[in-house]
Image (cartoon, rainbow, N blue to C red):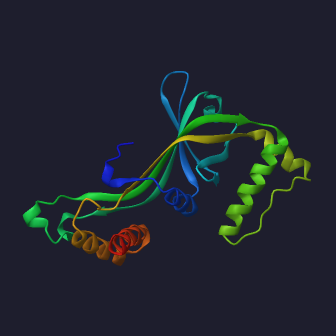
């Protein structure tokens, strides 16, 4: 990841927040043909201090589960277009448009598994998490022969992060007046733009308190 010092983060609380917002990653590997391969997958996230683990599964026909070696999991945060016209110093500083966002890259070696008990526990945890988020109550029934047979159609993975890069590009390289003006414009738009505005406003408060 291109990571200018102004946007580099070290506090894993940002990673916690990004995963809590959207536990759905892009997993990138390299196949035997030397070409990159990507899958979009929901994950279970676990962190104990500085140790970070992701767990999830592929559909068995997905060839990615056969890729050995290092993998990259991309965690996507909120993002928003920023117009140069929003900066108070746009004319004297010759500002140009940009994009503000937060993201994380986790690199590590994939551990693949397909034993029934472990897959059942993973599928149960994933469904419990996401069913609760949508206010529903479907549950994986480990006592059902039919549901257990369906586990043969998936392959699980575990990724222990060996390297974590966190980036929050929120206008920290601009004067605070620019950050405030952009945050106000994004807040009025709502949606993911308002999420970026909230992150920018939090940085401004931290800078003021500090």
Q: Residue furthest top?
A: 33
Kindly identify the residue that appears in the image at 65 percent across and 28 percent down: 66
Relative to 47, 76 lies left or right:
left
Numbered circles on residues, count: 0
Residue at the image point whose x is 90% and y is 52% from the top: 144
Q: Could you tell me residue 131's position as x and y percent?
A: 71, 65
Identify which residue is drawn at 7% across, 65% down.
92
Q: Quadrant of residue 7?
A: bottom left
Q: Position of residue 21 (x, y in %)?
A: 54, 63
Q: Quadrant of residue 85?
A: bottom left
Residue 186 picture location, percent across and down: 33, 72
Up/down of 29 relative to 43, above or below: above
- Residue lying at the far front of the rendered structure: 210
Q: Is residue 142 above or below residue 209?
A: above
> Looking at the image, is 154 positioned above or below residue 183?
above
Could you say which is closer to the camera, residue 75 or residue 17?
Answer: 17
> Is 91 displayed left or right of 15 in the figure?
left
**Whether residue 41 can be seen here:** yes
**Residue at image coords 11%, 60%:** 94
For the question of whether residue 61 can be seen, the reply is: no
For the residue pair 183 and 126, the one nearer the viewer reads as: 183
Camera-side residue of 12 and 22: 12
Instruction: Check the image and report above or below for 57 versus 170.
Output: above
x, y percent for residue 209: 37, 75
Quarter placement of the N terminus: top left
Question: Relative to 75, is 58 on the left or the right?
Answer: right
């Amino acid at each position: 990841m291109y990571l200018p010092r102004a946007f580099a983060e070290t506090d894993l609380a940002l990673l916690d927040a990004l995963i809590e917002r959207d536990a759905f990653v892009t997993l990138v590997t390299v196949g035997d043909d030397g070409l990159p391969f990507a899958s979009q997958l929901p994950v279970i996230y676990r962190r104990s201090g500085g140790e970070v683990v992701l767990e999830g599964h592929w559909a068995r026909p997905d060839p990615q589960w056969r890729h050995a070696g290092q993998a990259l999991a991309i965690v996507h945060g909120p993002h928003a277009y920023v117009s140069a016209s929003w900066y108070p110093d746009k004319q004297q500083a010759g500002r140009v448009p940009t994009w503000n966002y937060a993201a994380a890259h986790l690199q590590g070696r994939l551990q693949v598994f397909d034993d029934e008990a472990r897959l059942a526990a993973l599928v149960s945890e994933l469904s419990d998490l996401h069913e609760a988020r949508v206010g529903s109550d479907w549950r994986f029934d480990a006592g059902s022969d039919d549901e257990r047979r369906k586990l043969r159609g998936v392959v699980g993975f575990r990724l222990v992060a060996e390297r974590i890069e966190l980036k929050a590009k929120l206008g920290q390289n601009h004067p605070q007046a620019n950050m405030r003006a952009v945050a106000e414009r994004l807040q009025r738009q709502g949606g993911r733009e308002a999420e970026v505005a909230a992150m920018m406003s939090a940085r401004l408060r931290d800078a003021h308190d500090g």
